[in-house]
Image (tube, helix red, strand yellow):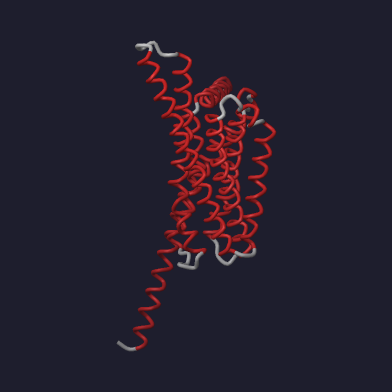
Amino acid sequence: MNFTDMNNDHTESSHSGEENERTITIINSALNVPLILMSILGNGLVVVIIMKNRSLQSPSMTFLFSLALSDLLVGLVAQPLYIANTLTTNIHSLRLATGMMAFFLCGVSLDTVTAISVDRLMALTYHLRYPSLVTPNRVRYTIMLIWLSKALTSSLYLWKMRECHFVVAFTTVMSLIISTLSYLKIYGIVRHHRLRIDAQQQAFRGNSNAENVAHMERLKRSALNMFVFYIVLILCYFPMYILSTLHGASLLNWKTKWDFVHTAVFMNSSINPILYCWRLPELRAAVVKILRKIFRVQTHQN
């Protein structure tokens, strides 16, 4: 084989690799389209419902509002920018805007889930003092701090891209550690209450305290609901955390086929509204009510 044949083989291999990368890019972009629709419709509905229903504007629901709002902006801003960036080349400003918005909004979602886990822990640990400790103003200040800190962190992407990956990986693992410790503590509290109720049932020969039993069931249900959100978040964010850590530590270069981890992170914003309606009865009832009104109006118009 002469040098010409070798060059031809190298050229064909290069074209084949480019075609494969292009195919992966198109598939990845196509996967984001239904996720965008789900995120906008689902989170938009949740945001409107919480804003219009005073009964749903408790501190815990305010955290949920922040989470739904960040997820809504993921569908409205971050994902369209991401698709545009993956389908185009050599647009530096678009690449920077995509990375910054993705880190900003997804970071807000992650930190808000962490704040929710701490909020549920405080509700269980200080259930008598909880209303005085977790006030609406303090919740709003916490949410403002989350959004401001993520805006500052994501702006690092404009100047130090690799360092931003590393900072995001570090803050992600810190958030996961805090959430994990919170849910472990929640499990311990719920288990302790269960043991106490079982002991009372035995002491009074089956005549349990109905109030304690009802309180225990609320604790278990609340803990389980938040734990479901947490597990889904881990499944969506963990691949991105691993690759961001390795990339930030200069142990590997980012490749096109790894862009699916971005889609996995975006998927969390689309799944969350489904989890809300599945796990939170009061929110599910409000969603059903507003959907019935919408379909009733459409039926009358037709």
Q: Which residue sits at x=50%, y=24%?
A: 281
The quadrant in which residue 10 appears is bottom left
**Residue positioned most to the front:** 203
**Residue positioned most to the left:** 1
- Residue 236 at x, y = what percent? 45, 47
| 262 relative to 144 in the view: left or right | left
Does 269 sit above or below residue 302? Answer: below
Count of numbered marks: 0
What quarter of the picture does the N terminus occupy?
A: bottom left
Q: Which residue sits at x=38%, y=11%?
A: 204
- Residue 4 at x, y = what percent? 37, 86
Q: Which residue sits at x=60%, y=28%?
A: 130
| 166 relative to 52 in the view: left or right | left
- Residue 241 at x, y = what percent? 48, 54
Does 268 sit above or below residue 290? Answer: below
| 294 relative to 214 in the view: left or right | right
Does 67 sit above or below residue 218? Answer: below
**Residue positioned most to the bottom:** 2
Q: Nearer the viewer, residue 192 or 210?
A: 192
- Residue 216 at x, y = what percent? 45, 23
What quarter of the picture does the C terminus occupy?
A: top right
Does 285 sit above or below residue 83? Answer: above
Q: Which residue sits at x=53%, y=31%?
A: 125
Q: Which of 128 and 251 is in front in this view?
A: 128
